[in-house]
Image: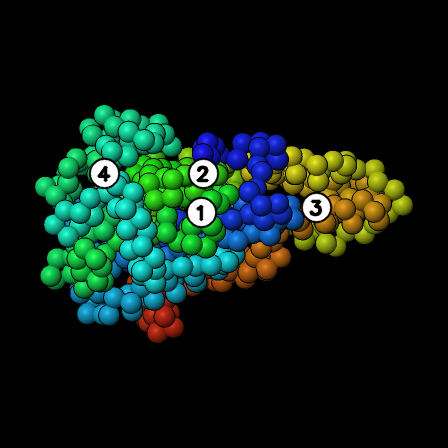
Amino acid sequence: MLEIYNSLTRFKETFKPLHEGHVGMYVCGPTVYGDAHLGHARPAITFDLLYRYLQYLGYKVRYVRNITDVGHLEHDADEGEDKIAKKARLEQLEPMEVVQFYTNRYHRDMAALNVLPPSIEPHASGHIIEQIAFVQKILDKGYAYVSNGSVYMDVEKYAKDYPYGKLSGRNLNDIVTETRELDGQDEKKHSYDFALWKKAAPEHIMKWPSPWSEGFPGWHMECSTMGTKYLGEQFDIHGGGLDLIFPHHEAEIAQSCAALGHESVHYWMHNNMITIAGKKMGKSYNNFITLEQFFSGNHPLLSKPFGPMVIRFFILQAHYRSTVDFSSEALEAAEKGLQRMQEAYARLIKLQAGKETTVEVVGLRQRCTEAMDDDLNTPFVIAALFDSTRAINTVHDGKGTISEADLKELREVWHTFAIDILGLRLEEQSADGGKQKAFSGAIDLLLNIRLQAKQNKDWATSDKIRNELTALGFQIKDTKDGFEWSL
Ligand code: ZN
């Protein structure tokens, strides 16, 4: 049995793929019933980084990231209804219309963040037959039972043969006290049994025939099924957010062991969570900021718009296993850091080589490589690149020289680590950033003139600026300190 459950600590020494030269990697993807927010950006960027780095190391990577488009009960206990079906009912849409709409928007946001598309992006709804077969296997092995048309994992029976809870470090007693009272409790033998197949209520829209009932698969089932379908009964890496360890990934392990007799995943890897101004993101805190709102600045918690590269840079500034706290101030600091990097890169491209090297540039590639090998230590990579900006600026200011060969190497290291591996768009963004700054500056200037006109009771000028900007598509809001605008 595979026994490894940890992050890729000391990546270079510990990571051994199952098949030489190839890596199979599965990451839990988005549930597409709403717009992507920061909680989606972090795993997407973390595993994009890993995907890029594995390819840099020469591996052929098959990267599978699923689309969860079948509702799941475990995720939100207070709603028994499939979230996609609910959204469809409220908006009078075909459920697959909702799925497609939010999938398109997710792809748009990921492209803006420069997250590469995965090799395969399977939909849970497209793999119902395979999921039914997987459930049947678990039933055949005796680790599940049918109750009132639903199928549940018999956790107690399973735990006699396999160590349930080993990934999250829980035992059954912990799990009993943690498990909330969920829908279907009266059908289960024990509160910790989880649904493999759920019988649908008559009003439920998204349901499929099965040997047990018209219904839908439990949430954990799709990842076990699609992971092993596309990557094999055993595969290298399974990733996702830390919040998925329990119950989702623990349940996946149980499903694989029960159906296949062994675990499927060789390395589990989890990114830590994002808080906003010190608080967990959640409906009750009303602090969900969608990526679109970051890009437009249209949210009360944001001081201004933040470009996708600022978001990416901000996330990569922290190690993926550390928590990250978002605030407008922290983003503004990240924006400055990114700008410094963009300026240094623009200078580096234009530098002229001299006869010899009088600045410190040796060892940069090694520092960056060692940092990446040390469990993807992106803050160290960024620090190493920043250190090299001193040499770039010294040569740029005419206070030092760099040889042809060293300049070529320096440019290559920047290109490899900043652009290819960290995935930062350094060139385009500096042009974009400059344009955006000029644009925002011009609108602020106009609105300041309007503010002055208002103070002088020059209503004609004030109204003209407001009306014409509104006609152009701007939304202008007067506030007690002045104004806010968005496009
Ligand atoms: Zn999953």
The residue that mark 4 highlights is 154
Instruction: Indicate which disc, 3 or 1, sits on the residue closer to the N terminus.
Output: 1
The residue that mark 2 highlights is 268
Which residue is depicted at the point 45% across and 55% down?
230
- Disc 2 from disc 4: Cα separation: 24 Å
Instruction: Indicate which disc, 4 or 1, sits on the residue closer to the N terminus.
Output: 4
Q: Secondary structure at mark 3?
A: helix
Instruction: Indicate which disc, 3 or 4, sits on the residue closer to the N terminus.
Output: 4
- Disc 3 from disc 1: Cα separation: 38 Å
Q: Nearer the viewer, mark 3 or mark 2?
A: 2
Residue 251: horizontal and vertical position, in percent?
A: 31, 40
- Judge by depth and name the residue closer to the eye, 172 or 370: 172
Q: Within 10 Å of the Cα at label 1, are there few (<14), some (14-19), or many (20+) other Cα atoms?
A: some
- Judge by depth and name the residue closer to the eye, 442 or 48: 48
Q: Are marks 1 and 2 in contact (CB under 8 Å)?
A: no
Query: Residue 462 appears in which quarter of the rendering?
Result: bottom left
Task: Indicate which disc residue 233 carries.
Answer: 1
The answer to whether residue 464 shows anywhere in this view is no
Image quarter where the C terminus lies is: bottom left
Task: Indicate which disc residue 413 carries.
Answer: 3
Q: Are marks 2 and 4 in contact (CB under 8 Å)?
A: no
Three-letter amino acid code of the residue under disc 2: Trp
Q: Nearer the viewer, mark 2 or mark 4?
A: 4
Q: Secondary structure at mark 4?
A: loop
364 to the left or right of 61? right
Residue 54: horizontal and vertical position, in percent?
A: 59, 46
Query: Residue 328 appears in which quarter of the rendering?
Result: top left
- Disc 4 from disc 1: Cα separation: 22 Å
Which residue is depicted at the point 30% across and 38% down?
247
